[in-house]
Amino acid sequence: MTIKTVKSLMMQAIIMEKPGGPEFLQIAAYPKPTPGPHEILVRVRATALNRADILQRQGKYPPPPGESDILGLEMAGEVAAVGAAVEKWQPGARVCGLLAGGGYAEYIVLHKDMALPIPENLDFVAAAAIPEAFLTAFQALYWLGKLQPEETVLIHAGASGVGTAAIQLAKMAGAQVIVTASGGKHPLCYALGADRAIDYQQEDFAEQILRHTDGVDLILDFIGAPYLQKNLAVLRLDGRLICLAMMGGNMSRELFVGSILRKRLQILGSTLRNRSLDYKIQLTRDFQLAAWAAFAKGQLHPVVDAVFDWQEVAEAHRYMEANRNQGKIVLQIP
């Protein structure tokens, strides 16, 4: 085997020296993936950070069995090769997509039906900021939350990647939108269409909502235990609470079951990473049919807060851990 052949079997990727802090992330040689019959090989040009990346880096969120142990749950790039059974994609096509892992690398493989064509008006940086945030928000609002026109939705962490996507998708559905976010992030939330923003650092969100409204129909929550009772308090009859993360903790000492029964509330928990391939393919299809054209028209747009070269991945992680971002943090891969 020649040196050239050996190099063709390898790529550069960001790997973890060991679980822990951002300083343990480094770029190193890694085996290049090979597409199966129904997969495409993509040369990654940009990938975006997610809270799951931080948890995995810390050793708290391993990838699903059989998936890449490289960080990165979304990417944008160019098709480099296609599997034997792939007809819908050709080398050179610009695509983005949701991943179960592997995005922090020069190449990834992706099932052909998980890839989305990048609209001409978006570059790789913008496209990389779409899949995880918008598919998570779409699943929570439409599939799980059954959001209806004129309902009111409360979106916690409104200036996060998923939050900024959820505001736009909820307004597209004709809903009223209330968000929680720190005060400095309110202008972004209003610019995206939020009808009311509450500073969770200065105000009790439940008190504010019940003072000015009769409650909300749907809640997207990323905080977990500290918000549970207040979330239940502000839900209207037949309200739905969608729990997507537990950034504030996973153990609630009190749960008043009476309000759940009296108001016929639904509490749903969901993750997307460990869903089946068939589930994620159908979610991608439904999202593409419902919303993809809106990106080309400028009616929906990803919110990118900061762009880092992938050699600055440690700094990008520190930036996210400091909760400084409004929208997505993107890594460019040259």
Image (tube, rainbow, N blue to C red):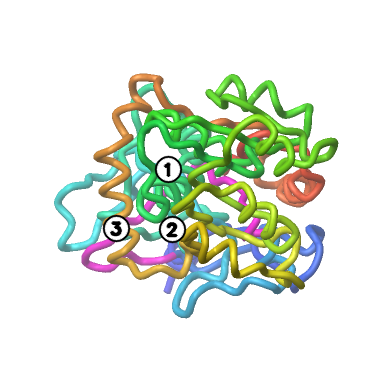
How far apart in space, not on screen, are marks 2 and 1 (Cα)? Answer: 10 Å
Which SS class for mark 1? strand
In this rendering, the answer to whether 291 lies above or below 258 is above
- Viewer-proximal residue, 141 or 283? 141
- Viewer-proximal residue, 7 or 245? 245
Give yes or no for residue 37 being in the magenta stretch. Answer: yes
Image quadrant in which the N terminus is located: bottom left
Residue sitting at x 58%, y 42%: 155
Query: In this rendering, does residue 101 appear at all?
Result: no
Q: How many numbered marks appear? A: 3
How far apart in space, not on screen, are marks 2 and 3 (Cα)? Answer: 17 Å
Q: Amino acid at mark 3?
A: Ile
User: Quarter-wise, where is residue 36 in the image?
Assistant: bottom left
Query: In this rendering, does residue 285 appear at all?
Result: yes
Q: Amino acid at mark 1?
A: Gly
Q: Earlier in the sequence, mark 2 or mark 3?
A: 2
Residue 126 — which label? none
> Residue reaching furthest right?
202
Residue 296 locus on image (x, y percent): 34, 24
How far apart in space, not on screen, are marks 1 and 3 (Cα)? Answer: 19 Å
Neighbourhood count class around disc 2 (C-alpha, 10 Å): few under 14, some 14–19, many 20 upward: many
Q: Are marks 1 and 3 in contact (CB under 8 Å)?
A: no
Residue 77 — which label? 1
Which SS class for mark 3? helix
Residue 66 locus on image (x, y percent): 44, 78
Horizontal relation, residue 181 to residue 6: left or right: right
Look at mark 2 in the image and give the residue it sits on: 108
Magenta extent: 33-53
Look at mark 3 in the image and give the residue it sits on: 281
In this rendering, the answer to whether 297 lies above or below 115 is above
